[in-house]
Amino acid sequence: MTRTVPTPEEMHALGGELAALLRAGDLVVLRGDLGAGKTTLTQGIGAGLGVRGAVTSPTFVIARVHPSVTGGPALVHVDAYRLGSLAEVDDLDLDASLAESVTVVEWGAGLVEGLADDRLEVTVSRALGAGGDETRTVDVVAVGERWAGAALPA
Ligand code: ADP
Ligand code: MG
């Protein structure tokens, strides 16, 4: 799917729509420039999953676990911006997260694809709206058996 998302509120809401599809063991890889809206989308996913703790852009923390307060899977939010190699990704030891939690990785494109055969690849891009105002487009591509036949948001 590709959708035009004109406001942060709608970005948050789209995260909620994605969260409704996500279950334990799922991986979401977020691509997009600084300021594109990746963390905003992740906040919406966290809200949809009913997790505890503010989902922020961590400056020093690379991976943060947000337990669910509703009995669902935890959200593991990874910011891979400062990670340069697969070895550093390995050091994060995401295996447990990838098995039990919903793992969302900002800046993970080109780094984490090898961790899971099944994933949602989400690209957030800045775009100009009809009135010349700044908006965003969000493109979601489902990869792997897990998502075969799954209905993504339109
Ligand atoms: P990233 O994590 O990709 O660096 P953020 O989620 O931190 O980006 O968002 C950067 C800024 O863009 C924030 O001020 C946020 O409110 C704003 N923003 C997010 N989504 C949208 C949108 N769809 N339209 C306009 N502004 C947005
Ligand atoms: Mg961010």
Image: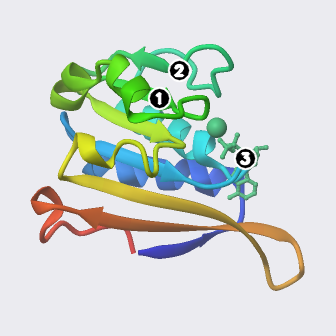
Which quadrant of the rendered structure holds the C terminus? bottom left
- In this rendering, the answer to whether 27 lies above or below 119 is above
Residue at mark 1:
78
Residue extending farthest bottom: 130
Q: Is residue 67 left or right of residue 99?
A: right
Give the residue displayed 87% in from the left and 72% down from the top: 133
Tell me, yes or no, whether the two marked residues, 1 and 2, touch with CB atoms within 8 Å. yes
Residue 150, percent from left and from top:
18, 66
Q: Which label was assigned to residue 34?
A: 3
The secondary structure type at the circle numbered 1 is: strand
Q: In the figure, is residue 134 to the left or right of 143?
A: right
Q: Which residue is mark 2?
A: 62
> Does residue 13 appear left or right of residue 34 in this picture?
left
**Crowd rating for badge 2 (residues with CA inside 10 Å; few <14, some 14–19, many 20+):** some
Q: Are marks 3 and 2 in contact (CB under 8 Å)?
A: no
Residue at 57%, 47% (x, y): give it: 12
Residue 115: x and y in percent read 25, 40
Residue located 37% across and 52% down the image: 18
**Whole-number angstrom distance, CA of label 1 to CA of label 2:** 6 Å
Q: 50 or 84: which is nearer to us?
A: 84
Q: Is residue 96 visible?
A: yes
Type of amino acid at the residue the image marks with label 2: Ile
Q: Residues within 10 Å of mark 1 (few under 14, many from 20)?
A: many
